[in-house]
Image: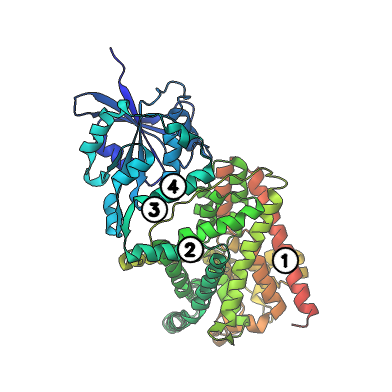
Amino acid sequence: MSTLRTAALVGNPNSGKSALFNALTGARQKIANYPGVTVERKAGRLVLPSGEVVELIDLPGSYSLDPSSPDEEVTRSVVEGNFAGEAVPDVLVVVIDAANLEQHLVFAQELIGLGRPTVIALNMIDLAERDGLVIDPAALSDALGVPVVPTVAVRKRGLGVLLDQLETAGSQDMSARHQVARLTMPERRLAARNIAKGAIVSESSVHQLHAKLDKVLLHPWLGPVILFGLLFVIFQAVFAWATPFADALDAGISALIDLARAILPEGIIRDLVTEGILTGVGSVVVFLPQIVILFAFILAMEQSGYMARAAFIMDRLMAYVGLSGRSFIPLLSSFACAIPGIMATRSISDPKDRLTTILIAPMMTCSARLPVYAVIIAAFIPATSVGPGIGLQGLVMFALYIAGIVGAMVVALVLRRTATKGAASGFIMEMPRYQWPPLRDLAIGLWQRAWVFLRRAGTIIFMATIVLWLLLSFPKAEIGESQVDASFAGKIADGLHVVMEPIGFNREISLALIPAMAAREVAVSALATTYAVNAEDDDAAAEGLIPQLRAEWTLPTALAFLAWFVFAPQCLSTIAVARRETNGWKWPAFMLAYLFGLAYIFAGLTYWSAVALGL
């Protein structure tokens, strides 16, 4: 029985390989793992016009034959015939994205240089034409020295011509392939640019505009300035735009509290509803507008194609501290929540790189910190202008986010030279097309994130607030005694306060830090509940959290509290995920120790400096 000829689909990620594989093989597929590695092996059979059956292998997406991940290692081994039990492909089908021609031609030249029968599938040609890009396949074929077939895999266009070329691929003239094989990576990149220019017949003004935008947004000096300028505008908007909506929510919650006091008789039930549930949970819910505005900007950046450019810019900056560019996406995810950020580190092949990213992910300023920052800034930072369109409150918020990023980079630099010492691996990122964010997708994304925030308010924060209220309310105080002093919670806070007092924290802060381990934003509800329980009468309790903070805290204490939350790992779920991803408690314990240590040191330095300056 004769052995089947084999063909391998090779190309960059997101080139449409899987769609082309499905179109060529249909249901004649088998999926398993390559022996010894957890990399998926997809193989199927296609029938050539002559009736010959060929086995088609869909290799993992790669950017180079110099591997930087297990996926790329498998691709190189199979293509070069070094993978045990895997036949050397008789034909290489190189799939390239017509709209990203220059980038995909770099790897295509490397594959052509191997001297194997090769066919280029110029895929997604319809999307390139939609964007105003007209490509001459014949010119591209002449430049590369191999057949080029335009295809649209999802619509099965061009598959007949592709099968014809596969049938005759064995008779290709490969005498000139050695010239491509001798090219270095920089030479291949230059050649890819020239080949792409020669093959592009015309491009629309929109496509040219996108290229000009990239020259500005990805500029080594202008790019970072634009990125940080945009972030600055975002945090100005978080305060300026959200204020009317937050005030309306605050008024609504105050009205509910008044209604509950009017309807319910005096007693433990009314106190639970007003001091515990409505005051505690409501103090967090009022920051929903800030959360929505922040995520509106983030989603718009993602859907417009700018977020990938931001990743490219940050990749260059991160290289200075020894981090792989592959770490950026997990760290970017951590701005929403550190939990998916830590889970996203699975895409990082280098174990030292991955561990470093896990250890610094909690330092990215997640959305749970926003209510904490917002309430303290609103209470102690005046809503004044420091320049045209620049508010002091937004400026402080921006500074807190930058402090978290800078702190994470410094920690990464230290870790990469000590506990996780090693060389950073390379990183290549595909630049998506620019587009206007679809309003429907933007609305769905905002609804999902708002629902997550409200669900946390209705579950974690709700339960933590009730437990704290019970601990604050019992046993009841004697006449003339403070309720917090008499309560179980007060006794617990007294023990922690001994440690926290030197850095300017009062007993209410010490108490709030304990339930805040469940979720950072619980600190706000904990403070609101504590001050509501300790209020002398209903009028004092109805004042709200911000006036009470102004009356009870000094500015140095408030600034120290902000500095604490820049670093402190106030989230048990994050620690649990870190334990799972590192297979033990060693590194999560190290994470807890160094983050709490940094939080204590910087909160103390902030407090002592503010007192020394007479603030």
Q: CA distance from mark 2 to mark 4?
A: 18 Å
Residue type at mark 2: give it: Lys
The residue that mark 3 highlights is 197
Q: CA distance from mark 3 to mark 1?
A: 54 Å
Q: Secondary structure at mark 1?
A: helix
Residue type at mark 1: give it: Phe
Residue type at mark 3: give it: Lys
Q: Nearer the viewer, mark 2 or mark 3?
A: 3
Mark 4 in CB contact with mark 3 (< 8 angstroms) = no
Q: Quadrant of the N terminus?
A: top left
Q: How is the image coloured?
A: rainbow
The residue that mark 2 highlights is 215
Reply above or below: 387 against 274: below
Residue type at mark 4: give it: Ala
The residue that mark 4 highlights is 192
Whole-percent x, y for residue 144 in the image: 38, 40
Left or right, residue 234 beside residue 356: left
Q: CA distance from mark 1 to mark 4?
A: 50 Å
Give the class, few, some or many, for how many residues have Cα within 10 Å of label 3's Cα (few <14, many ≥20).
Answer: some
Q: CA distance from mark 2 to mark 3?
A: 17 Å
Q: Secondary structure at mark 3?
A: helix
Q: Nearer the viewer, mark 1 or mark 4?
A: 4
Left or right, residue 382 beside residue 153: right
Give the class, few, some or many, for how many residues have Cα within 10 Å of label 4's Cα (few <14, many ≥20).
Answer: many
Of pointers 4 and 3, the one earlier in the residue sequence: 4
Displayed quadrant of residue 438: bottom left
Of pointers 3 and 1, the one earlier in the residue sequence: 3
Residue plotted at (33% across, 25% down)? 6
Choose between 573 and 366: the one closer to the eye.
366
Choose between 137 and 80: the one closer to the eye.
137
Q: CA distance from mark 1 to mark 2?
A: 40 Å
Q: Secondary structure at mark 2?
A: helix
